[in-house]
Amino acid sequence: MEKINTTFGDLGSKWNPFAQRLNRGFNQVKQYAQEKMGNIEDITKLPQEYLDLEESVDKIRELHETLLKVTKCYTRTTHDYDQSMSESFYDTASKVSEKISSNPQNQPRSPTTPISQGHAISKVCLDTANSILASKDENDPFGVALKKISNSYEKIGEEKINEDNTIVESFWKPFNTTLNSSIAFAMKARKNVSSARLNYDACKQKLKNAKIEYVDEARTEMENAEGEFVKAVEDAMAKMKVVIESSEPLKNLNAFIEAQLEYHKKCYEILSELSPEINELELNNEAILREKALSNQ
């Protein structure tokens, strides 16, 4: 019998913390409902410094969430052109292979889905160039121009991949880490403050309405709740200051800017070299067309 009593006593001690948490949760829900209905006026106010920190953290959190959404495209290949075009690339390669000569140097590349807009432009130009040069003079200006364009846009495509990788590693991933670490910790701490404040105010109401024989117990409970509330506020403020005072977001944004600057700089260099060559070939092509027109007269 003593063993049975001991067992039930142990079970009671084990269930006691659960019962306390359940009771505390019920009191918080009751307090919240009473406040929403306007039945309670004595609501503990949070310090102005705390409220200012909340506002600042919310702005930083919204910045992270929004920028991560609008830059998520950098985490995907073929994000800078219409991916539905990929099927036409297979068709183009198939048609070209039927028309092209058997010269191995003129064979098109294996049909694959281009991984960037630059690669896509390069592929279309190369397939068409191979087709033209296979049936005409290998020095045909239009075919030669298309090959030069293909080579240049292949380089641009590679630079685009480098830009994407740099942005993902130096901006997107660190930004996402910040959102899910320091910002998430601050948001969780704020929830703890809300919970502690409700519990504190519920305990104050309990003390206010307590019968004389339960006043001391209710006061002790209220004082403990007050201590938990103060501790929760201090903890949340410390975590929010970590978010606000961090230089990591600006560092990540600068990395994003530098990656884009480097990409556009490389594109400018490649296209600056290509443009005069294409201009010269355009003039040559026009001269050839004029000669043909005159010979046909």
Image (spheres, grey):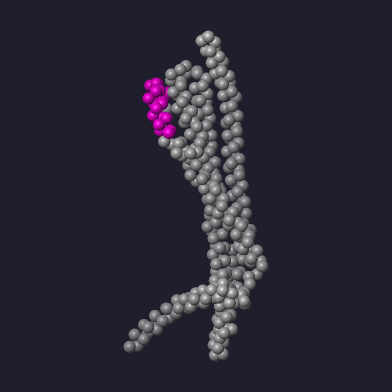
Q: Residue furthest right?
A: 48
Quadrant in the rendering for residue 291: top right
* Magenta region: 88-107
Residue 147: tell me if it is visible.
yes
Is 105 inside the magenta-drawn segment? yes
Question: x, y (%) of residue 37?
Answer: 56, 74
Residue 286 image offset from top left, x and y in percent: 56, 18
**In the rendered view, would you say 15 is above or below 144?**
below
Q: Which residue lies furthest to the bottom in this view?
A: 213
Q: At 46% across and 21% down in the image, what residue appears?
A: 132
Secondary structure mostly seen in the magenta stretch? helix
On the rendered structure, is 111 left or right of 154?
A: left
Q: Quadrant of the N terminus?
A: bottom left
The residue drawn where x is 48% and y is 34% is: 120
Q: In this view, does 8 lie above or below 237?
A: below
Residue 117 is situated, as x and y percent measured from the top left of the image, at 50, 36
